[in-house]
Amino acid sequence: MTTPSTTQTDALMKELERVRVEALYSAQAYYEASKRLERQARYLIFWPACVSAASAFAVAVGAPKWLGGVAALASIMAATANLMGADRKPAAYRKVAGEMTALRHKIALEIALAQFASSIQALEEITRRLAAEYQALASIAEPTSNRDYKSADKRIKAGVFG
C-alpha cells in the first residue's frame, strides 16, 4: 500500500470534482428537459382532448355539425401525440436526472472522505469507479437539447437546482 502523495491526491480530487460538476450539469439539464417536455405534452395531449370533448358535446346539444370535424381533428392530434410518447419522455428524463443527482451526491461524499483514503490505489479505484458510472449513465441517456443545457447553466450559476 502506497500512502497518497499530495500531487497524486490532488490529481484524483480534481478528477472527482470534474465528474461531480458534469453530473451536476447533466442532472440539471435533464430536469430542465423534463419540465419543458411536460409542458409540451400538456399542450399536445390535454388541450386537444379538451377541444375534442367540448366540440363533441356542442354537437350533441345541437351546435353545427362541422364542430364534429373539429372534435375529430383534435382527437387525432391528442391520439398521435400520445402514441408518439409525448407523455413518456419527460418521465424518462426525470429518471435520468434523479440518477445523475444521486451520483453527484455519491461523488461529493467520496470527495469529503478522500482525506481518509488508506492508499492512492484505493482513491484511484473510487475515482475510476465513479467516472465509469457517470460515463455508463451518460451513454445510455438520450441527449438533451442545447436550450435545456443553457437553462441548466443559468440555474446552476444562480445557485438554484431542481
Image (tube, helix red, strand yellow):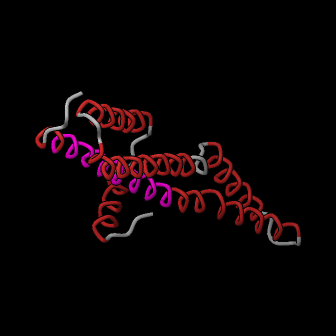
Residue 49 falls in image quadrant:
bottom right
Judge left or right: residue 71 versus residue 94.
right
User: Is 26 covered by the magenta stretch?
Assistant: yes
Residue 50, relative to residue 135: is it above or below?
below
Q: Position of residue 145 (x, y in %)?
A: 37, 50
Magenta span includes 146: no
State the residue lying farthest toward the top. 1
Q: Quadrant of the N terminus?
A: top left
Q: Most extreme residue toward the left, as rendered?
A: 7
Residue at left offset 34%, top offset 57%: 147
Residue at image coords 71%, 65%: 50
Left or right, 118 with reference to 91: left
Question: Which quadrant is the C terminus positioned in?
Answer: bottom left
Task: Compare residues 12 and 50 and report the one nearer the observer.
Answer: 12
| Res 75 → quadrant | bottom right
* Residue situated in front as seen by the camera: 97 or 3: 3
Q: Which residues are magenta?
A: 10-36
Q: Which residue sits at x=59%, y=43%?
A: 84
- Left of 87 or right of it: where is 32? left
**Image quadrant of residue 57?**
bottom right
Does the magenta stretch mainly form a helix, a strand or a loop? helix
Where 66 sits versus 102, above or below? below
Residue 71 placed where, x, y %?
74, 60
Can you give x and y, in whole percent of width and height, for residue 41 in the image?
58, 57
Front-most of 3 and 32? 3
- Is residue 147 shown left or right of residue 91? left
Task: Give the total number of marks visible in the rendering.
Answer: 0
Where residue 90 sits in the image (x, y, percent)?
A: 54, 52
Direction right: furthest residue: 61
**Residue sitting at x 23%, y 34%:** 120
